[in-house]
Every structure is written in structure tokens, then in C-alpha cells.
Image (cartoon, rainbow, N blue to C red):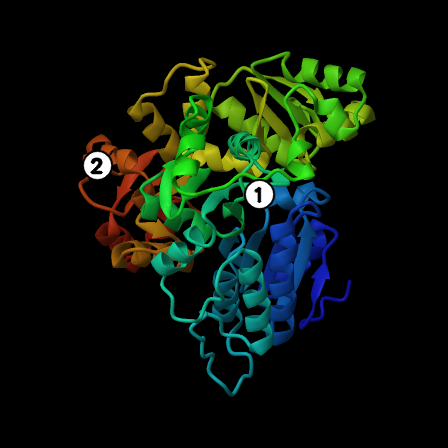
Amino acid sequence: MDSKSGVAKNINSKKELDDAVEKGIPVILHFWATWCDASKHMDLVFTHLSTDFPNALFFRVEAEEQPEISEAYSVSAVPYFVFFKDGKQVDTLEGADPSSLANKVAKLAGPINPDEPAAPASLGLAAGHSILEAVQDLAKSNGLSPIGHGNDLDQELKQLINSHPIMLFMKGNPEEPKCGFSSEVIEILNKEKVKFGSFDILTNPKVREGLKKFSNWPTYPQLYLKGELLGGCDIINEMHKNGQLKEVFREHGIGTTDSSEDKAETKKGDVSDSTGLSSSLTSHLSDIISSSPVMLFMKGIPEEPKCGFSRKVVEILQQEKVPFKSFDILTDDEVRQGLKVYSNWSSYPQLYIDSELIGGSDIVLEMQKSGELVKVLAEKGIIAEESLNERLKKLISSSPVMLFMKGNPGEPKCGFSSKVVNALKEEGVTFGHFDILSDREVRDGLKTFSNWPTYPQLYYKGELVGGCDIILELKNNGELKSTLSE
């Protein structure tokens, strides 16, 4: 492949990538998957950027088809971007965040024209009109007003929440939910025969994190009625069972629909009628799913996974010491194709807990990071309830270099966190991170656990290195990189 700049190209081997990186010019790598809509949306932005920044190389990697490259950069969810300069990795970006991608590319690759300084618009992009149009289209598809109109995040969230009388923030969409809890709320709303709007929080990290703080509700799905939060899956399920949900809808003037589509609503137990699968296959799939409290459908076996995404879920379950059974979908094409229809989930791996679909690798990884996975497993009696100290130890050890900060590396929420992030990036240090603003229990508990009263806090191999002052002192003395690689 001719590594000519100015256009996005597919890369087919790690050697090909290594050769390009060694040249020292800026390289941006986009990990994507054919089944991920967010990847496809972000690739539009990626392609536009490749023409507007001709001094950099833009490469795509189909994550599941290139496991060697995916594993080299610890890719467990898509879209995922890796940035290189002067022959080394300098930054990463996870998720569908067009503004952050364009800003990072502009910072890495410099001005579009050598004689002109980059001048980011209110969108936060140092790119041309074509980029702005692409991102606005993406924003519209997510139900957002185009960024750059002066609305702050709270205002955008209010607009979203009030965009429909009944508004559901979920993982995935009603036709293809990306977690069992979202799927359950969709099923309940369909049974209640009400019209509702929805927003896929997996497509927009800013909305996903911002709404948790805005609503003071840490998990998804979240259901709103005329601008007011009703609750998550457990509350909606309970309200549905005792008739409260129907009553609340009626009190707020929400009518029901009686279309033929609603009457053809899928019922649990009528799966073969609604999916077209034979009764025998439906029964077979149900038996496999229920054969273990935790059941993983994967490519390969736990000892020898056949794709990086399956390997990641296996590692997570093993890290959490979860007993589970698995089924290798590569050995049975009928199960492989049938389960996609049965679960309304188009890719693998698929993880089930108590016969209920949890999701794929990206969902499981997010649940592990937030502590939701352990919580669900404990509630189901599959593992013992985890103490706060145990959770903190796991978080601290989740990456060799682990930063507890306010915000995230792409959007720090305080100057001290921003300084530490910049110091680590300038030294080329790869690090994990946790936003302590997203979890009060962790924020308060870690102060006691570490006997360190402020944030940020940086850990190396499970041991506290220190806060902002110490990190900057180590950097200024030329000791930071060596301290974090001993």
C-alpha cells in the first residue's frame, strides 16, 4: 500500500502500520467494525479530516479482522482512535465524539494550510466547512441540535429530554437495544402501548456522562415523562407490574396507540412467531442460554478466543472471578445465525446473565468500569457483594498507570487534572483513567483509602505516586517516565 497522505486508507498488517509510524509524520488510526453504526458515522468525519489535513496519514483498521493490531493497542470497543507522532503513540480517543477527534487531529497535524494558523470554530473543530456539515449531520441523527449554536450542555440535555412527552435514554435503539435493561424497558413501553422518543447514549459520550450528573442518576436506561425523570429499569418494571405506570401516563394525558403494529407486539414465549425461527431452534437456544447463570456466546473458547472482542469479555469475567459457561458460535452456524435473530443482537460476543442479554464487549467493558457489572452479578447472587475497598483495589489495578481525575483526558474538569494529563501525554505514557465526578462513593472512598485528600491521584502498579505537584516535579526533573516504567 502506498502510504500517501491526504486520503483515508485501509491497513492490512501490523508491519504496514509500523513502517508508516516509523517515518515520524503524524498518523491517525481508526479502529472500526462493520456492525457498529457509530463507527460508520465517525468514518465520515475521519474521511473529511484526511483531506483537510494532507500532512498526516489516516488509516482504518477493521478491529475484528486484524486482531494482532487490535490487541497491540488494547482495543476492546469501537470506534477507537490512536494518534502517533515522531514515531511514537501520543494520544487515544474512545467513542463517537466528532469534536474531540477533529481537535486532536488539528493539534497533531497542525494548520490545514502551512501559512495559516488553525482557528477552531465554536464547534471546536480546526477544519473546513465540509467537516462542520458532517458533524452537524451526525448531531442531527442523534437528536441533538448542531453544536456551535451557543447552547451549553445543560440546555442541550433539556432539549433532548423535552423532545418527546415520553423520552428514553438507552443503550442502542428500540429496534436493536444494546443491553438487556434497555430491552426490558422497551418491552414494557410497547406493552403499555405508548409512543416514545429515544436517544442512544452510546453514540455520544458527552450526553452519556453529562446526563448522569444532570439527572443525578448514575446508570442507563433513564425514562423521562414530560421532562421529569421516572427512573431506570427496576423502577419502571415495578411501576408496570403494579399498574402505577399506566396510571401516571393517564394522569399526564398520555394516550395509548391501537395500531396493528402494537397489536402484533412480541410476547415473551412467542419468540418463534415474531422472529420466524422454528420452535425447535427457539427451544434449543433458550436451553443453551439458561444452561448457566452466566453464559457467553463467543468466537472460540475461553482458553483460545478467536477474536479480540471475545478475548476481552473473557478477561473481564476472569478478572471479576465470575464462574461462567461459554458456547463457540464458530462450531454451529445454525446457533450463530439463529441467536442474532433470537436476541435481536447482530454481533458476537453476547453475554447473558440469568438468561437475560447484557450485551457485547463494549457494554460489558463499560459496566465493569462503572462497577455496574459486579453490582448486577451480586444482586443476582452469582458473586458475593463487593466491598468498597475491593472495588477501589480493582480500579487502581485496572491499568499499570492509573489516573483518578476530574473529567476525562479529552475534557478535564479542573486545571490540576489537565496539567497531569498533559504531563503524561508529553512523556508518551499510556494510562487508564477514572472520572471521580461520576461516582461519589469512589470519590470519597479513595481519599480515605489512599490517605490523600485531593485530586488528581496517580497510581503506578497499584501504588500511589502522588498528585499534581509531585507529578509536575517528577516531569521537570526528568524522572516521570522512568518512575512509571520501573
- Residue 369 visible in rendering: yes
Q: Residue at x 27, y 37 (%)?
A: 440
Image coords of residue 60 (percent x, y): 67, 56
Which of the two residues, 88 or 194, is positioned nearer the viewer here? 194
Helix, strand or loop at disc 2? helix
Q: Mark 1 or mark 2, which is nearer the start of the sequence? A: 1
The amino acid pointed to by label 1 is Ala
Q: Give the side of residue 62 with respect to residue 214, left or right.
A: right
Number of numbered discs on residues: 2
Q: Amino acid at mark 2?
A: Lys
**Image location of residue 348, percent across then percent down:** 68, 33
Mark yes or no: residue 87 visible.
no
Position in image of residue 301 (x %, y %): 68, 22
Point out residue 456 in the picture as x, y percentages from the top left corner.
Answer: 27, 47
Farthest residue, direction bottom? 115
Residue pointed to by mark 2: 447
Which secondary structure lies at badge 1?
loop
Q: CA distance from mark 2 to mark 1?
A: 30 Å
Viewer-nearest of discs 2 and 1 = 1
Residue sitting nearer the eye, 210 or 21: 210
Q: Residue at x 66, y 35 (%)?
A: 345
Q: Residues within 10 Å of mark 2 (few under 14, many from 20)?
A: some
**Relative to 368, residue 67 above or below:** below
Quadrant position of residue 134:
bottom right
Indicate the quadrant containing the N terminus: top left, top right, bottom left or bottom right: bottom right
135 sits left or right of 453 in the view: right
Residue 273, quarter of picture: top right
Q: Which residue is mark 1?
A: 77
Q: Quadrant of the C terminus?
A: top left
Q: Residues within 10 Å of mark 1 (few under 14, many from 20)?
A: many
